[in-house]
Image: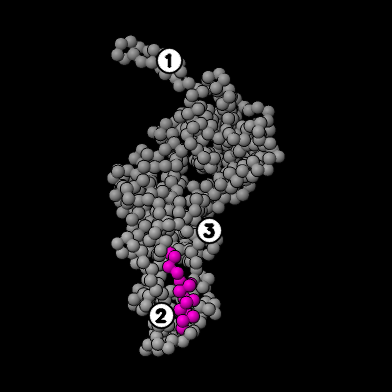
Amino acid sequence: MAMKAVGEGFGQYDVATPDAAGMVASLSSFGYSLEAAVADLVDNSVSADAHTIDVVFTWLGRDSWIAVVDDGTGMTPAELVTAMTVAARGPKTQRSASDLGRFGVGLKSASFSQARQLTVSTATSGVWHTRTWDLDTVERHGEWRLLHGADEETSAVLDELRDRATRGTVVLWRRLNGYHSDAVDGRDEKTQQQFYTEARRTEAHLGMVFARFLRGSRLRLTVASTPVEPWDPFLSNHPSVHRLPVEELPLGTETVRVEGFVLPSAHRLEKDEFERAGGPRGWLDQQGFYVYRRDRLIVAGNWLGLRGLRREEKYALARIAVDIPAETDVEWGVDVRKSSVVPPVGLRGHLRRVARQARRQAEEVLRFRGRIAARTHSGRLVYAWSVRRLDEQVTCRINRSHPLVRAALRPGAERKDVHALLRLLEETVPVITLRTMHETDSGDDPEPFGGAGPADADATAIARRIYEALVLEGYSPADARERVRTYPPFDQLQGFWS
């Protein structure tokens, strides 16, 4: 670190220039994952009004490379040098409404975390300008030597990526961390598989982070030639999603928009819908707040460290969208990687209240599989099992008031009633309720009689016995069918009662 004393007396000061090698090491250690680093580059493309962005993964063993290519407005030579300079624009720099940047270090810190060589080539009207950061050169000379142009191999790659385009920007990473090693062989299928697994993970991450941009024709984004599909964490168009009222929370002169969603349980989703709704990290880890800044997702599924809120399986269906203005970055503590926030003190109580409401309703959906609202007009619910928690002790008993149980216990009960009861008990073991009370995690819940849809012969036979038992107890045929229709699991099946 070079120092130069300036002035005299109390006003004297030292100009302390950071050591180039030390600064490189610091920027390389920001903790970016590969997918988060690529997302930072895509931010720049979106800010440059790009309509098409291609993320290219090319496997060449130790010479493998990754590039982000866009058709945005491009940069002049002066703008390119500014973009390549660390922190050339601070967080207080005036930015356009579409600019997703914050600190002016994203391109460099994201790139240095993944590669030893960063090359950017850009054009505004047919003439391409290129600059390169070679970290070996910076460390060897101890200076921020931003190289003009690119070496021969890199230039060949750039020519391929630009493909006669007259404007846009190419960001190219070479000498990738973890791959640029003599131990990596281009014929190593295991390492190659790992490389393209990271590409698929990046694709899923970008589909989540830039979902709002990908809807409609606003943006076209590909990863390894595969179109990125937007991932909607709230299943906004599904008819069984419960939306909480939108709240507009004041923060200084700005407004924070908050909307809670309670997703439907698995039996109301097709198999592929359920798997996709789980998101890149799975149902348990995707619950919580989703914080957006200028439509770009910052936090994906997190309770933001709010007191009394922790990730639990029974709240897996609760997701809350929070839109924060970029002007409130300081209040929210948006970090360099744009991957974490700290809620402002004045909003924490409101956020906690919305979260508790969403969590409470999510727990009810999980416990009763969304049946409560449909049955409130049908009188007291009758389940074959009764699960209770008393003094921290969970008990599970057969409900003796269930009509089929009463029929089976009646003196001289017919064998078919007993067999029907046994099958009903087998198919309605209260796994969901027990798991919720115990707060355990399992994805293997049985669906009674195979799940929602037309009832099979077994289910129909049991429903028939319940119907006949109700008629014997004095119910009219119509009332008996109505009550069968409200009994689990027949409320989710189709048959003579529906």
Please give the residue where the numbered disc 3 appears in the rendered image. Answer: 275
What type is the residue that disc 3 sits on? Glu
* Residue 349 in the image: above or below residue 47: below
Magenta segment, which residues?
A: 417-432
Left or right: 43 with respect to 196?
left
Q: Position of residue 162 (x, y in %)?
A: 64, 37
Please give the residue where the numbered disc 1 appears in the rendered image. Answer: 3
- Element carrying mark 1: strand
Proximity of marks 2 and 3: CB atoms separated by less than 8 Å: no
- Element carrying mark 3: helix
Please give the residue where the numbered disc 2 appears in the rendered image. Answer: 405
Quarter assignment of residue 97:
top left
What type is the residue that disc 2 sits on? Val
- Element carrying mark 2: helix
The first of marks 3 and 1 along the sequence is: 1
Q: Main secondary structure of the magenta part?
A: helix
